Image (cartoon, helix red, strand yellow):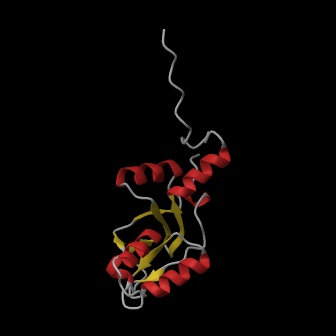
């Protein structure tokens, strides 16, 4: 049986509304020690993600965090997967789409989040990553 992504997701998942200000988002992320959050629309549909790097970039541009809304800086069309999707499949999708953040869903909506750091953490905790197809490549063969 393949390990589902729900086994390594962070839950509960916090999200922000598309009209929330960067000021409010930064407060949430600081209080909850989050490195990113999904952005949802009025119908709770996932529309994007905001990472700490996005907030930093906005500060560099000298945007007023009380005046800029999430929809203005979020990265649209985030990768989302079902909670039963295998860890290996999610890793492959992340590489294929070149993303660091994945939103995990069920019929009721967002149930968790996974980042590239979660994969690194899992690999270091499991040692060789055996069982999930996440093992380190074998060392190169010695010459003749």
Q: Is residue 62 above or below residue 79?
A: below
Query: How many numbered discs?
Result: 0
Apparent side of residue 135 relative to residue 50 in the rendered image (left or right):
right
Above/below status of 98 relative to 132: below
Tell me the residue at 60%/80% (across/down).
31
Q: Quadrant of residue 134?
A: top right
In the visual, does 103 lie left or right of 96?
right
Q: Quadrant of residue 131?
A: top right
Residue 99 in picture, x, y percent from top left: 40, 58
Residue 100 seen: yes
* Coordinates of residue 126 in the picture (x, y in percent): 66, 45
Tell me where residue 101 appears, x and y as whole percent.
46, 62
- Residue 137 x %, y %: 52, 33
Q: Tell me what residue is drawn at x 50 percent, y 24 percent.
A: 140
Q: Is residue 49 visible?
A: no
**Nearer the observer, 122 or 3:** 122
Q: Nearer the viewer, residue 11 or 25?
A: 25
Residue depicted at x 38% and y 72%: 57
User: Residue shown at 47%/50% (left/top)?
Assistant: 91
Farthest-out residue, bottom:
66
Give left or right: position of 66 versus 30. Answer: left
């Amino acid at each position: 049986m393949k390990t589902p992504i729900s086994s390594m997701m962070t839950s509960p998942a916090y999200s922000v509304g598309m009209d929330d200000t960067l000021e409010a988002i930064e407060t949430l992320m600081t209080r909850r020690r989050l490195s990113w959050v999904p952005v949802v629309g009025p119908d709770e549909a996932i529309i994007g993600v905001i990472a700490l790097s996005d907030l930093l970039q906005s500060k560099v541009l000298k945007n007023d965090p009380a005046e800029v809304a999430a929809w203005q800086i979020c990265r649209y069309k985030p990768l989302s997967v079902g909670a039963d999707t295998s860890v290996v499949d999610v890793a492959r999708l992340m590489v294929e789409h070149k993303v660091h953040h994945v939103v995990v869903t069920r019929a009721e909506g967002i149930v968790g989040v996974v980042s590239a750091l979660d994969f690194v953490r899992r690999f270091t905790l499991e040692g060789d990553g055996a069982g999930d197809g996440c093992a380190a490549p074998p060392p190169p063969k010695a010459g003749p």
